[in-house]
Amino acid sequence: MSKILQIRKNNYFQEDINPHDLSLLKIWVEKLEKETPTTVAELEEFLNKIEELNHKLRDTGGEIYIKMTCDTADKKIVEDYTAFQQNISAYFAPKDFAFKNIILNSPALNDWIAEHGKTGTLLEKILKNDRDLFREENVVLGIKESELGVEYRAITGSMTVEFNGEEKTLPEMAVFLKDKDRSVRESAWRVRSEKMLTHKDELNTLFDKLYDLRQEIAKNAGFDNYRDYMHQAKGRFSYTVKDVHDFHDAVESEIMPLIAELNQKRKDTLKVDSLKAWDMGVSLDGKLLKPVKNAEDLIPKHITMMQKTDPSFGENFSAMNDTKLLDLFNRKNKAPGGYSYPLYKYGASFIFMNAVGLHSDLTTLVHEIGHAMHEFTQADHKYTSLLDLPMEAAELASMSMEMISMDHWNECYTDVEDLRKAKYDQIEGALKFFPWCMTVDSFQQKIYTDSGTAELREKAFMDIMDRFSNKAGLDWSGLEKERAIQWLFQLHIFEIPFYYIEYGIAQLGALAVYREYKKNPQLAVENYKKFLNVGHQVPLADIYKTAGIELKFTKEYIRELVQFIREELKELS
């Protein structure tokens, strides 16, 4: 039986934060600044206070952000978000830096670390990294960067097109890209691209501002370029920039040949002279999978699917629904994309997405549920605000949930052939994600270590598309203008820079989890739950080991997984 999640009680900071009023926060901070923990017990209490205050502020900012993405046209919410960034975030960032120094300078730190083993050592490493990167002048620049990211969501969230006599949002146009009629698909793709082309100059101007801000942030911190700065800022302790480039090469040499084979099959089946962008989403058997007939069935069916995957997953997701922590359906003035936003006050997440009646509604929701389950299992962990989940682990949770839940998609697809098709599409889709992942990451690697002018950005993007898209057998002739602006659709490039290669690393991990699931489903799910529960209490490589897999993305490792994928696709064909 589900239940409404209760708000967790705070021990130190009970009152609500007003984004327009700093007075209460200043009182709290000034008290903390006077603390000098000299014993392990005092340091532990200080850490607990910092943890609670961080969560308090994140929840306040998070709830404003959620409201803003749910309605980008609400000017009052945008004002609240701006006020939170300019008042609360700007004030607290240097204070947070000071608190970390109090921790690092405590004479009790070594004894505290000894008591906490790998977790203590990891926390010290992260705090020192944060201290080394902090520059007070970057606080204001970071706030400006965040505000520009909001502009991107506002611009793209308000985009609509006229199609078949009706106003449609860009996410709604995805339905027509799966139409059996090629002329409908082409028309939909062109209308969508033309709309983005009308905003090309506006978005390029926006990105110019972001680019300059980011390079300035990097230089302030002593780095030659923003790429190198972000690699360290993201705490990528387990792999190097060279490893990332090797990953690009491995995808090109090991994955692209199989994708080219699959696309040749697509071309032959569709009986077209060449594969165009509007040919990539349509089902080869002409059948459009829809997980539910009625939108209101989406949530209950997913509750059952999660229950079958593991009872705790079903119970948790049901509680999220009862607590009104879901906004799943597309509408005008809703920001694009999807996310799971942790709300520590509930020990859970808010799930946001744009369902439009496609199979992707199922996979997107399952993906975000994977993130949410991560938050549930970490709810009672200590130091989670200081030990933020590395994205390679966070995305492993979501992408693996997509794979290990597949056997239970029959809740939505009662027809055996529909279920087989859904599984085939999931595995093929996981494979075909890699070229775009490498494109997005390569593009950012290139522009942030070179010139970022609009002209050079466009050339860089086209060159990278040649490397991956063309080798997949996709024909862009006659579509040069449209091809050059495809990166404008990718919100991560604007709002969450360099958060993308993690998807590729995690996707490899999810395929490895699925390979273990095929051997022993029960053991794989149990290992997955252990992985969720470990959070970020150990280094990234150890986190992956907990899931029963390795943190690897070498050519040899990828070659093994490609062979596994090839066999799975053959079995499902």
Image (cartoon, grey):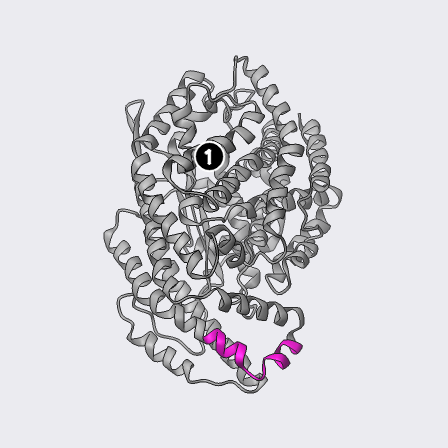
Residue at screen point 43% across, 78% down: 12
- The dominant secondary structure in magenta is helix
Nearer-the-camera pick, 552 or 536: 552
Residue at screen point 49% across, 42% down: 446
On the image, the x and y values in percent for residue 147 come to: 32, 53
Query: Is 391 located above or below residue 138 in the figure?
Result: above
Give the labeled residue for mark 1: 461
- In the rendered structure, the answer to whether residue 272 lies left or right of residue 147 reads right
Residue at the extreme right:
519
Nearer-the-camera pick, 302 or 469: 469
Q: Residues within 10 Å of mark 1 (few under 14, many from 20)?
A: many
Verify whether residue 225 appears in magenta. no
Residue at screen point 31% across, 76% down: 24
Magenta stretch, residue numbers: 99-115
On the image, the x and y values in percent for residue 321 come to: 45, 52
Nearer-the-camera pick, 17 or 454: 454
